[in-house]
Amino acid sequence: MKLDYDYIIAGSGLAGLSLLHRLLLDKDLQSKRVLVIDKVEKMDNDRTWCFWEKGAGIFEPIVHHHWETLQFFSPDVSKTFELKKYKYKMIQAGDFYSLVLGHASSFENVTFKTEAILDMKVKDGNAILETEKGQYSGQYIFNSTGLFNPEMNTQNTLLQHFMGWFIQTDSPVFNEKIGTLMDFRLEQANGTTFMYVLPTSNTKALIEYTLFSESTLDKEDYQMALKEYIEKELKIKHYELTHEEFGVIPMSLAKFSATVKEEHRIVNIGTAGGFTKASTGYTFQFVQKHVSQIVNELKLNQSPAISLTWKDSIYAWYDRTLLDVLLSKKATGRAIFSSLFKKNSPEKILSFLDNDSNFWDEFKIRNSVPLLAFMSSGMRQLFSKKKAQPKN
């Protein structure tokens, strides 16, 4: 059977386009026939990704701003710290889409289609994608759609939901060299609640109101919280709102599968593959690491269905334990993060959250959180054997 494409990328968001970009940057793979398919075209500046990274990454040309000094605040902790290994970076979705799609436009072997995806399967050893208009075959499908996600509910999932305001002031009020990673000096009635403050110049900043809870708020509640914080905490009376964004990220104990229907020809990527960090919602860097591994395996003619390493499994257990503590309300998010930043080097916390710490640092971090709460949740997650139940 002659295949329509070598690779089919189902979903054109962060994960799908990151994989496409890395494929096209690789001399061994850039001539492969690739189909990118989604029900909508992604072009709008609809979100902002922030992450910490060592050195320069492949998306360095579109880093909107970076910070080498960060702050953390809670009622009993106030820390300003310099980053030595990392830079905290911001990328805007509009720039990301422009870079990837602009680069892809010069490759005749890349096809884009706007069609609703209905199903995926393997037939005669080939991956088959079914859409509202027909079907397409390929050697592999890389799926970032939510078609096969496990069931997520209030028992196993917290939502990280946020509204961000990009504001501009008439006079200089910000220090663009210092970003606020978390400010917990807020009411916590709706769950774990904090603000980001990320200045990009002395008159411009992203102010983001973020919560971890079972459900979202009314739009007016986010707007009221942002307005109050800007005026009362930042002491800014006059400003212009230049852009507003809203997002919801699932932080879930549900078991995400590496493949669809246990078929190694259909590989899950992005949130669909569990590459949204369960304890924090951070996604960008975990997606980059995964799609980079996929490209390396494809170059070696190996299966891109990559299994978790032992170290990956340990970090997944840490994430699930923290999320279990929050879900069961054994401790508050503010108490946990305050304790972490009070008792540890902030940069070592970032290494830990990046799944890149050493045994001794992990030991110290584990011993700086509420012991009984984490022991109980840790044991429960260690012996949890429930498997994912994908939707059909």
Image (tube, helix red, strand yellow):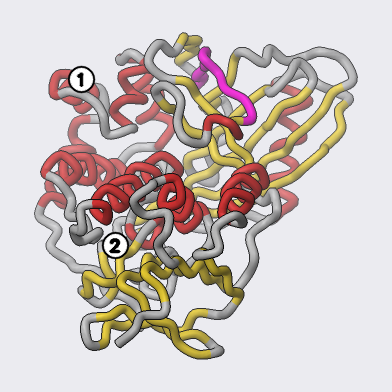
Q: Nearer the viewer, residue 328 or 181?
A: 181
Q: Give percent across and percent down for residue 47.
A: 63, 47
Question: Which residue is under mark 2?
Answer: 256
Dividing the picture into quadrants, the one containing residue 283 is: top left
Measuring 41% from the left and 39% from the top, which residue is drawn there?
A: 285
Measuring 33% from the left and 59% from the top, which residue is drawn there?
A: 273
Q: Which mark is residue 361?
A: 1
Q: Nearer the viewer, residue 185 or 163?
A: 163
Q: Amino acid at mark 2?
A: Phe
Measuring 43% from the left and 64% from the top, which residue is drawn there?
A: 144
Magenta span of residues: 64-74
Looking at the image, is mark 1 or mark 2 earlier in the sequence? 2
Q: Amino acid at mark 1?
A: Asp
Determine whether, in the image, residue 201 is placed left or right of residue 292.
right
Q: Which mark is residue 324?
A: none
Determine whether, in the image, residue 43 is placed left or right of residue 53.
right
Task: Identify the image quadrant of the C terminus.
Answer: bottom left
Q: Give percent across and percent down for residue 378.
A: 17, 43
Spatial CA distance of label 1 from label 2 is 28 Å
